[in-house]
Amino acid sequence: MKTQPLSADAAVERITFGRSMGEGPFIETFRLLALHLEQMLRRTPSKSILIMSTQPGDGRTTTATALARAMCESQKPVLLIDADPFGTRSGSASALTNGDGLARSQHNGHSLLHRYRPRPELPAAAFINDVAEAISAAGPLDMTAIIDTPPCLNSSIAFGLAPKVGGVLYVARPGTRRRPPHGEIRAQLDLLGATVFGVVVNEA
Amino acid sequence: MDLGVFLRTYRRKWVVPVALLAASVLGVFLYQQVFGLKESVAQVAVLDPLTSRPGAYTQAQITFDSIINSQELAIRVGQRLHRDPASVRGHLSVSISPSLQTYNASPVYAVYATDKTQDGATALANAAVEEGRLLYIELNTPDPEALKQALADQRKQAQADLDTAAAAFAAFLRKYNAVDLEPRIGKLRDTVSSLRLAAIQARADEKAAYAAGDSSLGWAAHQRAASLDASAATQQANLNKLLALEIPYGSLAANIQVAQTRVNQLRDYELGTLTGEQLPLAASIKIVDPARPNSHQLITLLTYAIGIFVGALAGATVIYLLALMSREPETAEEIGHAFGAPVLGRIPAGPVWVVRGGQN
């Protein structure tokens, strides 16, 4: 597992555009969400959260990044795993790293935010196993793993990882056209034995 | 469709059903103003002559409701009110006022008239009742000369029927020599019975003579019994011939009786007519209530109620269609409900959140 150092403050500043994440309703939402999830993670064997949604643009990466930032604010080390092998390596996730591997962020002299990105060229099963190993590696380090996955209607990676994490956070954006099959996705997760934490609705 | 979606659409588009409701009420109001007619009703009692003199010979009566609905009445009322008879006929109606009696031979008629104004309706009802009364009396009052002529004709016909029946009876009597048929039949019956009894007695004498050993007396009794039987057979044959004539004889006699009765009845009625006792009654008709306004409040209320119902139904239908076609975004609650998990957070709308070059 390769690691690359990265400044957390610098990263956060790079993932936002036009405003600061420091204060305001946006980051407050994720601070509250972080509190909820920390409580829920105490009852799960694995301190890991899988972020999934149905379609591109639902806000998975935004949620993962902002949630990671909110958890870091409470001095909790976080491992942010970019488990989307099909997406471009850009955006907020790529803002945390300059390449593959585990990145470590520094905050007030402490290592809090880390990022891991499996090699995208791996076969799906190997890719999932690689992510699962990263999650397992984060456990002994008392890090909370946040896994950003590809859209679950396009890829089965999210479903493959769902039983291996502490819980699933489902991100959805209210749509005006076809409504995503929320119920069917939940049924699939239940069949796989995954734990569902809840839903984040992206109204932005 | 989810009731919540329907109600939410109703809440968002409440102006549509309210506008439709208002339009329907306005439509009813305009309808009432443009097409709504005022109505007046008058009550008329018609005394049936049959009721006042049951069993009396009367002419057929033309009923008052037929007269109210007639073109002749419409023409007369139109001339009286200077209106088009067609419009008069279309604005008049009649019904029988309810009665507690199961059968009421002298009904009270309610004559309804409609017009754009209440005064017009009242005038039309009064004119129709008055003209109807006059026409009813005119049509139903008997003409004495016509009556006498009709009676004479009927009596003449009845007399002819009687003459025909009598002639047929006489011809029958001549043909079959059936004068005094019934006495002759009775006499023959007696003769046949006497002969048969005498023959029975002769046979008894014959048996007694032979028993006493007097064969000459027995033979004489035997000869007498045989002679009596032959005579009885001959008389029985004559009786049978007369009995065969009995049925047609009775039928022809009955025809004469019926014709005679009819002639007698007509003669009596003609006599009574001449003395003024049995003239058919002149039609009796009385106006119980002159025309008065008839309230349409209930119908008006019902019309408005129907309008409100139709408006509300149309509004609900439009809302239903809008809800079906709506592209309203899901709410957070709907997503949470559909996914079966609590909504832990909402990424708020507000200042633009731009992810530089990212997919999400």
Image (cartoon, helix red, strand yellow):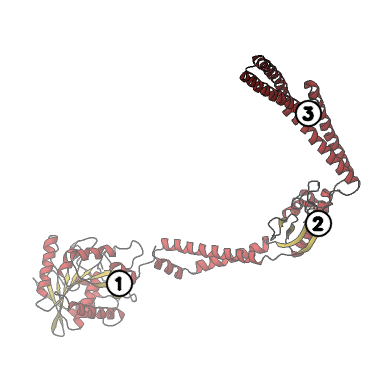
Say which residue label 3 marks.
Answer: B183
Please tell me how crowded label 2 is: few (under 14), some (14-19), or many (20+) other residues with Cα within 10 Å: some
Amino acid carrying mark 1 in the image: Val
Mark 1, secondary structure of its residue: strand
Q: Nearer the viewer, mark 2 or mark 3?
A: 3
Which of pointers 2 and 3 lies earlier in the amino acid sequence?
Answer: 3
Say which residue label 1 marks.
Answer: A201
Which dot marks residue B285? 2
Chain letter of the residue beneath label 2 in the structure image: B
Q: In the image, is A28 to the left or to the right of B132? A: left
Q: Looking at this view, name the residue that lies furthest to the bottom.
A: A108
Rendering coords of residue B140 (x, y %): 82, 49
Q: CA distance from mark 1 to mark 2?
A: 87 Å
Mark 2, secondary structure of its residue: strand
For the N terminus of chain A, the quadrant is bottom left
Chain letter of the residue beneath label 1 in the structure image: A
Amino acid carrying mark 3 in the image: Pro
Does residue A9 show up? no
Rendering coords of residue A120 (x, y %): 14, 63
Rendering coords of residue B167 (x, y %): 82, 27
On the same chain: label 2 and label 3? Answer: yes
Which image quadrant is residue B96 in?
bottom right
